[in-house]
Image (cartoon, rainbow, N blue to C red):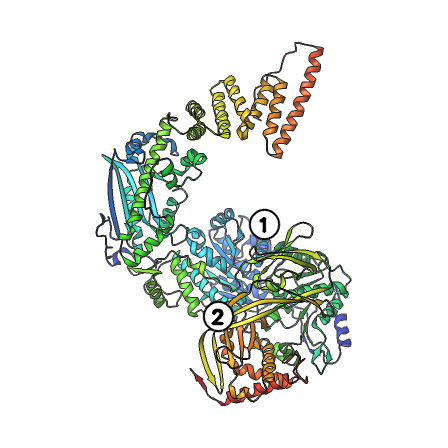
């Protein structure tokens, strides 16, 4: 069937190039595209982060790939799209692609700009050709936005699009690392708070489609310059952020790290099963100032690492501190301690005391119900034991292991 | 089972002379069966047989055969004749042959979609592999939406969702569009006027997208009896359609009676109240255990009739369950489902409904229908009448004529109903404003190529216009969308928009009991109003306009309230003005400001006025289209000014009642307004305007027929037996004795001048 919207390429009239005087743009690989390459040297710093940080530590990003394969620096392609709308509607398509890839001497940033909507297939081909040989695509929020959009556009215009096998969406680790401290994990906010970079005169994302539509009507790309710059900065910020995340994986808790971040890193590492490194991060977090709830979270995390490392007595000490402070983690700790006293030490008085503490910390009806039940059971046990010991002393104590009920 | 014959012979013996204005007996017709084709899937055949359907009726068999030949069809058979099998059987058959195939069902309301979902699921339940049917509407959760997109074999939705959600996001619906084999358009006759014109473009956009994805769905439409179903379907979908109307369902004898309540005062033209007569008849049916439906013409009428009927049957007036129920828009969906189920099971013996039960909601068939007042169109009358008649039993339909001009016309001219054809449905896909709106939506969905049409409608000029307005961008022979706007959001398919007002009952615990559109809320939910809901009375404590909430508590009082509105009219734009004879008729845009002023407390049963109160609510503004006629100075000079005033208000009360004859509408869709000194021409002016925001083209229709309207009005006044005006003509006169005479004389004078003079366009 004929495709009414996209004439076959041979009969498309040559497109008049957009006016790009004063811009360092060159015709792209195909007509209807403009392209700009910028090379950033190893020594280039984006905010507080040097490009070399990323290039040297890329191997640590392999933790974030699905296969956990070791990748070289030049096997990552960073990608960021500017599109004609966020609505996910049939009319939302990419008009500017920013891509970056490590090559000898530094980081190559290539931006490809679509000067005529009919040439969208060429734009997709330019992405594919830049990605040739790469193993992993790196995006920020690409899992929800960029990649599904590209796939749907490829289907829509009936062209093929082969992207690198692996996809690392930096939004995921960024949320785990910084949401507790920063709340907003938007790229612009991370840029300020994590990379210490402040953009001046940036275009609000919501206005970008309008800039492009104005260009379509006027043919004048000059007003789009802030959009091009916005896109290039987004790509650089992504690379720098990847560098920070790689550094965290390489050196979990450097001395100057914000205590809240050290706590988040600890949690991240517990999930990754790196208990030793996690314990170091929790300790680092506890050395600095943390609000009460975060302190109890750090104690609870540290205690769990210690348990995994077989240091149960140290763990108990740390859990006691968590339970003293309170909060959801303090509650967990108190429950753990109650079980520990009951089953491991058969110390019913302490177990009762901890259950009472847990009861005081619990906030849901269900938790209170189950703790109340535990309390009654413990009191019964204590009564039976005390009446028994008064009759026949020296009975062997039961020794069951601590169980996570 | 009730005995309808006893009620009918009682009616025949006891009705005063002249009350039985018409009594037509439609003879019984036996069932006419066809056969399923041998190719019908055995699983489908088994599930049909399980439901007691051994053989198809002739129309079902023909529908299946025509669809199998690849034709688009429109099925026109009466209510409850097994219409939905005409599409469900071909669709399920195809899904069993081709599991990747898809079907889209369109219903005008969410309630009908839910109804169909239940029926489809019942039909598909025993069939393996599973056939998945889902509704997709504003109530569908975000999580459910992706499942519908991915795996729904049958997607049941409404034109509004198709327009604003599915088509603009077609890239998320690839699975549906690539394999769409059927589009079902049920209740085709509801898509008429401006709404229908909009829907016709939505269907064109749908077909354009299907073509892009390489599918070419067949259309199966069904419609109530209208004059032009085939033509209408053709216009609506832009394709040839064949007609299936060989109804094979069996019918018992049906008695269709037009009942004109007896005159109380022939002199004043006052007849016994339609409500009173409706209750008397309904009571007779119920005492004979005949399941009955009463159709009333407004929500308030439903509630009043319900209250009176329960009283006369000695039932608790505010029962929320029981054998006598109400049914109307504004009840909660769960409440409606429960009433529908009660009707099917027979637990509910009588239901008082608005035209909400005119459409194909499944309530089975009842034995008797009482139409309290003419529903406004022949189509509606037969739809409502179709609710009576179960299998081979005899059934009765009684239309009680009210004292309005139109009802009295019917009572004296029953042939209009029995031998007149049903109204035609008209749409106008070439209406420039509507077309332009949908060209925008369509260009957003898929870029137009040079020379491409919107399903045979040429749009090149519009595309150029949109490009010069910087909405489209033309490059390489393609028109691309180039605006940050989302065009579907600017186009509302139906005129009644605006948020609904939620009604919150605070009597014991806070609960939502219903909802209402904003304009109606001004007169029904103002503070101090008595709001009636399923026969229960609620006092409105507080109406929070900003929050769209009215707070009510249940009361037990012996009155109801009726609000009065002040209407102010301003002409905004005149699009056409022509002189005929000495009169000037104009068509244009007006702004109406409607301000609720006071409400009256009216005692139940006696309808006497027992008090009043002020209403403090913001005015409601509406822009709409109007046609108006200015009385020339020399005719005005022939009458005392009091006579001019009473004559014009007499005509104003009469003309909207005649509007349905000239434009397919309900009398309430048109309103009249009189200005004794028009702000623009100083002349006494009579306005007729569309009662919905932006207008639906009724004024333009009436504008073209002023002469015929005036002739009809003149004839009614002349023939009316009253002496000085009555509800059947210019309305009862209290202060001006010459109301009727002067209205007649002025109408005659206008006509004399008009029919003599040539038409001059300005």
Front position among marks 2 and 1 = 2
Q: Earlier in the sequence, mark 2 or mark 1?
A: 1
Viewer-closest of B197 and A347: A347
Q: Position of residue B657 (x, y in %)?
A: 60, 76
- Badge 1: residue crowd in 10 Å (few <14, some 14–19, many ≥20): some
Q: Can I make out residue A349 in this image?
A: yes
Q: Position of residue B734 (x, y in %)?
A: 67, 80
Front one among A361 and B133: A361
**Marker disc for residue B463:** none
Q: Where's the C terminus of chain A, which quadrant?
A: top right
In the image, residue B671 above or below residue A98: below
* Residue B98, placed above or below residue B357: above
Confirm whether circles 2 and 1 share one chain: yes
Q: Residue at x 63, y 19 (%)?
A: A349
Q: Is residue B540 left or right of residue A246?
A: right
- Count residues near mark 2 (Cα–Cα under 10 Å), then give few for <14, some for 14-19, many for 20+: many
Residue B224 placement (x, y as % from top left): 57, 68
Q: Quadrant of the N terminus of chain A?
A: bottom left
**SS state under label 2:** loop
For marks 2 and 1, give the CA distance: 41 Å
Q: Chain of mark 2?
A: B
Q: Which residue is mark 1?
A: B126
Does residue B80 appear in the picture of this structure? Answer: no
Residue A96, relative to residue B27: is it above or below? above
Look at the numbered disc 1 and give the secondary structure of its residue: loop
* B345 on left or right of B488: right
What percent of the width, then of the height, locates residue B732?
Answer: 66, 79
Q: To which chain does the residue with label 1 belong?
A: B
**Front residue of this view, candidates A330 and B228:** A330
Mark 2 lies on residue: B427
């Amino acid at each position: 069937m004929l495709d009414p919207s996209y004439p076959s390429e041979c009969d498309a009239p040559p497109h008049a190039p957009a006016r790009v005087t004063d811009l360092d743009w060159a015709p792209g690989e195909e007509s209807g595209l403009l392209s700009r390459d910028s090379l950033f040297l190893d020594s280039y710093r984006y905010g507080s982060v040097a490009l070399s940080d990323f290039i040297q530590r890329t191997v640590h990003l392999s933790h974030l790939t699905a296969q956990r394969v070791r990748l070289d620096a030049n096997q990552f392609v960073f990608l960021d799209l500017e599109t004609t709308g966020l609505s996910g509607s049939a009319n939302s398509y990419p008009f500017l692609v920013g891509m970056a890839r490590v090559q000898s001497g530094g980081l190559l940033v290539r931006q490809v700009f679509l000067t005529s909507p009919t040439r969208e297939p060429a734009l997709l081909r330019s992405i594919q050709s830049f990605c040739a040989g790469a193993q992993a695509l790196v995006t920020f929020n690409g899992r929800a936005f960029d990649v599904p959009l590209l796939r749907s556009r490829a289907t829509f215009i009936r062209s093929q699009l082969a992207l690198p096998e692996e996809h690392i969406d930096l939004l995921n680790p960024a949320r785990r690392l910084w949401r507790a401290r920063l709340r907003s994990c938007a790229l612009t906010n991370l840029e300020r708070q994590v990379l210490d970079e402040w953009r001046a005169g940036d275009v609000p994302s919501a206005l970008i489609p309008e800039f492009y539509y104005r260009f379509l009507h006027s043919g004048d790309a000059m007003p789009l310059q802030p959009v091009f710059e916005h896109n290039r900065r987004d790509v650089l910020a992504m690379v720098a952020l990847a560098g920070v995340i790689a550094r965290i994986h390489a050196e979990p808790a450097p001395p100057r790290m914000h205590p809240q971040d050290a706590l988040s890193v600890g949690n991240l590492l517990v999930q990754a099963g790196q208990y030793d490194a996690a314990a170091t991060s929790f300790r680092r977090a506890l050395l600095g100032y943390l609000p009460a709830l975060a302190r109890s979270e750090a104690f609870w995390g540290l205690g769990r690492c210690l348990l995994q490392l077989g240091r149960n007595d140290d763990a108990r000490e740390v859990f006691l501190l968590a339970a003293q402070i309170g909060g959801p983690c303090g509650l967990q700790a108190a429950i753990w301690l109650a079980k520990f006293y009951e089953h491991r030490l058969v110390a019913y008085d302490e177990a009762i005391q901890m259950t009472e503490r847990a009861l005081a910390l619990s906030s849901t009806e269900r938790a209170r119900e189950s703790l109340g039940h535990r309390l009654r059971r413990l009191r019964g046990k204590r009564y039976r034991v005390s009446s028994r010991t008064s009759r026949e002393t020296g009975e062997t104590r039961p020794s069951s292991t601590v169980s996570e009920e | 089972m009730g005995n309808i014959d006893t009620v009918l012979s009682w009616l025949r013996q006891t009705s005063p002379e002249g009350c039985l204005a018409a009594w037509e007996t439609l003879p019984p017709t036996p069932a006419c069966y066809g056969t399923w084709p041998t190719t019908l899937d055995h699983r489908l055949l088994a599930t049909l047989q399980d439901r007691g359907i051994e053989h198809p009726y002739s129309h079902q068999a023909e529908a299946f055969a025509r669809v199998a030949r690849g034709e688009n069809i429109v099925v026109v058979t009466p209510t409850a004749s097994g219409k939905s099998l005409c599409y469900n059987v071909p669709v399920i058959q195809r899904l069993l042959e081709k599991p990747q195939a898809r079907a889209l069902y369109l219903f005008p309301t969410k309630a009908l979609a839910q109804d169909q979902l239940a029926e489809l699921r019942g039909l598909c339940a025993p069939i393996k592999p599973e056939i998945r049917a889902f509704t997709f509407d504003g109530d569908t959760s975000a999580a459910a939406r992706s499942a519908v997109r991915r795996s729904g074999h049958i997607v049941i939705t409404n034109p509004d969702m198709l327009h604003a959600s599915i088509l603009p996001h077609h890239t998320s619906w690839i699975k549906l569009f690539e394999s769409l084999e059927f589009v079902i358009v049920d209740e085709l006759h509801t898509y008429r006027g401006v709404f229908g014109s909009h829907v016709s473009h939505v269907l064109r956009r749908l077909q354009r997208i299907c073509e892009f994805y390489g599918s070419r769905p067949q259309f199966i439409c069904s419609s109530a009896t209208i004059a032009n179903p085939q033509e209408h379907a053709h216009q609506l979908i832009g394709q040839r359609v064949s007609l299936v109307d060989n109804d094979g369902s069996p019918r018992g004898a049906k008695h269709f009676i037009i009942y004109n309540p007896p005159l109380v005062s022939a002199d004043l033209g006052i007849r016994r109240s339609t409500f009173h007569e409706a209750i008397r008849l309904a009571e007779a049916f119920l005492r004979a255990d005949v399941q009955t439906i009463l159709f009333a013409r407004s929500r308030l009428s439903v509630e009043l009739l319900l209250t009176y009927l329960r009283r006369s049957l000695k039932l608790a007036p505010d029962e929320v369950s029981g054998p006598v129920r109400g049914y109307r828009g504004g009840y909660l969906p769960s409440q409606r489902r429960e009433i529908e189920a009660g009707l099917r099971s027979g637990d509910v013996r009588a239901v008082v409904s608005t035209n909400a039960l005119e459409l194909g909601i499944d309530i089975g068939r009842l034995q008797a229908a009482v139409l309290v007042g003419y529903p406004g169109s022949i189509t509606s009358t037969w739809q409502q009448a179709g609710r009576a008649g179960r299998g081979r039993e005899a059934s009765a339909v009684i239309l009680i004529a009210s004292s309005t001009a139109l009802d009295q016309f019917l009572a004296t001219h029953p042939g209009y109903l029995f031998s007149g054809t049903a109204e035609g449905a008209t749409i106008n896909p070439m209406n420039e404003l509507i077309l332009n709106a949908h060209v925008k939506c369509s260009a957003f969905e898929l870029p137009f190529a040079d020379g491409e049409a919107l399903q045979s409608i040429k749009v090149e000029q519009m595309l150029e216009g949109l490009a010069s307005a910087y909405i489209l961008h033309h490059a390489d022979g393609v028109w691309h969308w180039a605006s940050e706007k989302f065009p579907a959001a600017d186009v509302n398919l139906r005129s009644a928009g605006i948020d609904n007002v939620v009604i919150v009952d605070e009597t014991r615990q806070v609960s939502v009991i219903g909802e209402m559109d904003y304009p109606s809320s001004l007169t029904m939910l103002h503070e101090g109003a008595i709001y009636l809901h399923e026969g229960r009375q609620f006092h409105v404590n507080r109406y929070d306009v900003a929050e769209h909430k009215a707070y009510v508590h249940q009361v037990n009082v012996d009155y109801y309230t009726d609000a009065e509105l002040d209407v102010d009219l301003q002409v905004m734009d005149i699009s056409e003005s022509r002189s005929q004879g000495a009169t000037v008729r104009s068509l244009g845009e007006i702004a109406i400001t409607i301000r609720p002023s006071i409400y009256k407390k009216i005692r139940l049963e006696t309808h006497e006025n027992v008090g009043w109160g002020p209403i403090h609510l913001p005015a409601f503004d509406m822009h709409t289209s109007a046609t108006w006629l200015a009385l020339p100075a020399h005719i005005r000079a022939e009458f005392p000014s009091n006579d001019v005033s009473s004559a014009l208000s007499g005509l104003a009360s009469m003309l909207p009642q005649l509007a349905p004859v000239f434009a397919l509408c309900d009398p309430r869709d048109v309103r009249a307004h009189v200005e004794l000194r028009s702000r623009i021409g100083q002349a006494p002016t009579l306005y007729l305007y569309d009662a919905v925001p932006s207008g639906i083209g009724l004024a333009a229709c009436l504008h073209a027929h002023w002469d015929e309207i005036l002739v009809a009005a003149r004839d009614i006044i002349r023939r009316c037996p009253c002496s000085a005006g009555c509800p059947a003509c210019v309305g009862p006169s209290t202060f001006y004795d010459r109301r009727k005479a002067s209205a007649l004389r002025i109408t005659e004078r206008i006509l004399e001048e008009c029919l003599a003079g040539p038409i001059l366009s300005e």
